[in-house]
Amino acid sequence: MVVSQSAFDLAYDELRARWPESTEEHDVATPYGRTRVHVYGPADGSPLVLLPGGCATGLVWCANAPALGRRYRIHAVDLLGDAGRTERRGTPLRGVDDLTAWLDALLDGLGLARVHLCGHSYGAWLAVRYALHAPHRVDRLALIDPTQVFAGFRPGYLLRALPSLLRPSEARARAFLAWETGDSRPDEAGQRLYALATTVPGRKLVAGGRPRTADLRMPVLVLLAEHSRTHHTGKIADRVRRALPQAEVAVLPGATHHSLPLTAPEQLNERLTDFLR
C-alpha cells in the first residue's frame, strides 16, 4: 500500500508542532535538491547538526531540541533520499560520495564552517562517513546506537524487517516497531510518522560498507541502546572500545533502537551536553 502524501504531511505537521515556537524552517539549495532543516537555539550558539535515522525525518529530535537549544544552535536535517521535505532533484544520488558532497553543500549553504555532528542509526553511519570525508569541519562526533558502523545487523532483525521492506504498509511498519521497541515505543505521533514514512514513494537511502572508524581523530561519543535489537549491545561496546580507545562509550538504560531519540530524552540530553562541553 502506498500512503497518500496528505496523510504523511499531516503526521509530519503534527510532530513539527512539538518543536519550540521560535524554530525556523530553512530550505537550503544544494546540487541534489533543496534540503529542509529545522533550526533552533541562540544565533550565536555553537552549531550542532542532527542527522536522524531512516524514516524518522529531522523532526524526531523534538524532545531534545528544548534542552540542547539552550546552548547550541541546532540544525536538524531531513535526509536526502528519505521521506520528509528535502527534495531530490538535480544531480543524481548514486553513492556515498554524493551524500558527503550533499552535506558539504548543505553546510556551505547554512554558512557553517565547523560543527558538532550527531547522528542516530543510519544518520550515525552518515555522520561517520562525513567526519572521515571532512574532518576539518567536525569538532565533535556523537553516534547514537549507530548501525553498519561497528557491526552489521543481527539476522533476526533483518528477518523481522523484511515484510515491511518488500511490501511496505503502515500496518507492517507498526508491527515491526512494536516488536523492536516493546514497552518503550514512541508515542502515537512518532509511530505514525515512522510508519507512514516507510510507504512514501521514491525513498532511496544510499547504503555502503562499514567505515574505517580507526581513522577518526576528533572526540567521539557512542551511546548505545540497552535493549537494541539491531545488534548485541555488549559486543558493540567492546568493539567500539577496541577500535576507538579514545571514545566515550555509554549504554542508555531501558532504551531500544527505534525508541530513540523520542524516548528517554533526559538521558540523551545529559550525555550529549556533557560531551559537547
Image (tube, rainbow, N blue to C red):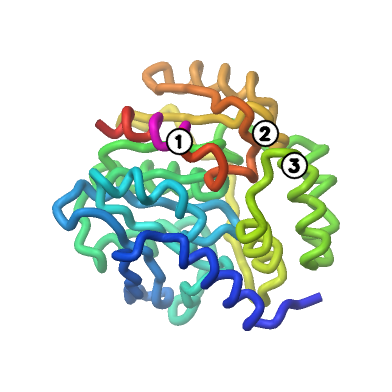
Is residue 56 shown above or below 17? above
Is residue 240 shown above or below 186? above
Position of 259 with respect to 172 (left or right) is left
Q: Earlier in the sequence, mark 2 or mark 1?
A: 2
The N terminus: image quadrant: bottom right
For the point 59% across and 76% down, the residue is: 10
Position of 194 with respect to 263 (left or right) is right
Which amino acid is tagged 3? Glu
Residue assigned mark 2: 228
The C terminus: image quadrant: top left
User: Which residue occupies the foreground of this view, 93 or 166?
Assistant: 166
Q: Is disc 3 surrounded by few (<14), some (14 to 19) or many (20+) residues within 10 Å? A: many
SS for dot 3: helix
Residue 178 on image: x %, y %: 77, 47
Which amino acid is tagged 2? Ser
Which corner quadrant of the image does residue 269 belong to? Answer: top left
Which amino acid is tagged 1? Glu
Distance from Cα at disc 2 to Cα at disc 1: 18 Å
Q: Is disc 1 surrounded by few (<14), some (14 to 19) or many (20+) residues within 10 Å? A: few
Residue assigned mark 1: 266
Position of 269 with respect to 151 (left or right) is left
Distance from Cα at disc 3 to Cα at disc 2: 7 Å
Q: How many marks?
A: 3
SS for dot 1: helix
Residue assigned mark 3: 180
Of tags 3 and 1, the one toward the viewer is: 1
Residue 213 on image: x %, y %: 46, 32
Magenta-tinted stretch: 267-271
Residue 98 shows in this picture? no
